[in-house]
Amino acid sequence: MYFDLTSLGIHFDSIIIWGLLMACLYNLLLKFTIEDRSSSPLVISLIMLVSYGLSYEFVDLNAGMYVYLIWVKYDFLTIIALLVSHKLLKLPYTSTLKYILAGLTINTLIFLGIHIDIVVFDNKNYWWFWSFYSIGITVIDFFMVVTLIFGKDWLHIGKLLSKRKQKKQITNFKNC
């Protein structure tokens, strides 16, 4: 079943933008109340708020099938803005940044996939990817807001990867 989220999407976008605003204000509060707090979460949430706010205001949902390509461009520019801002401001690459970059990359790939499916291949028949698109984008946007609020490795992916790295180093050492 294909979920047509065009009308619901407008309201969900408002909720996501509100969540990004709350995350930005929360990170601003933490920046000024906690000594030695990194500016990275604040910069990330500010860039995300501006990006999603601009895309909400300037993307015409009546742009037809090319709206997906517009969102690909917005996500790509947001990824570049995040990386450049961290490089220029010499901010650490926090787990928050890594989660947001992963979320934006996945969103970009999903938008690109749906664009290729509908525009390039001219597919008009429902298949599972359309529902995956509808649910996937929504869930990833929600996870990015949660990441900006919690600001931690809340899925413990970093811990998992560091254990794997340690295990690999130990096995390499044993083989010497």
Image (cartoon, helix red, strand yellow):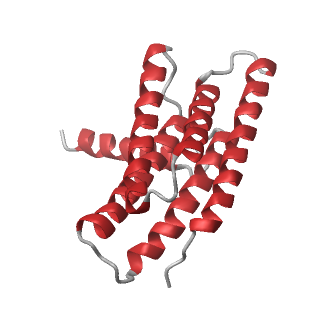
User: Position of 67 compared to 17: left or right?
Assistant: left
Q: Nearer the viewer, residue 148 or 16?
A: 16
Instruction: Find residue 174 and report its image quarter.
Output: top left
Which residue is located at x 62 percent, y 30 percent?
Answer: 46
Which residue is located at x 37 percent, y 82 percent?
Answer: 127
Number of numbered labels in the structure image: 0
Vertically, is 36 above or below 65?
above
Q: Nearer the viewer, residue 149 or 50?
A: 50
Image x and y of residue 176, in percent:
18, 38
Residue found farthest to the front: 62
Vertically, is 1 above or below 10?
below
Vertically, is 136 above or below 58?
below
Image x and y of residue 117, in percent:
30, 69
Which residue is located at x 57 percent, y 69 percent?
Answer: 5
Instruction: Find residue 110 and report its image quarter.
Output: bottom left
Image x and y of residue 60, in percent:
51, 52
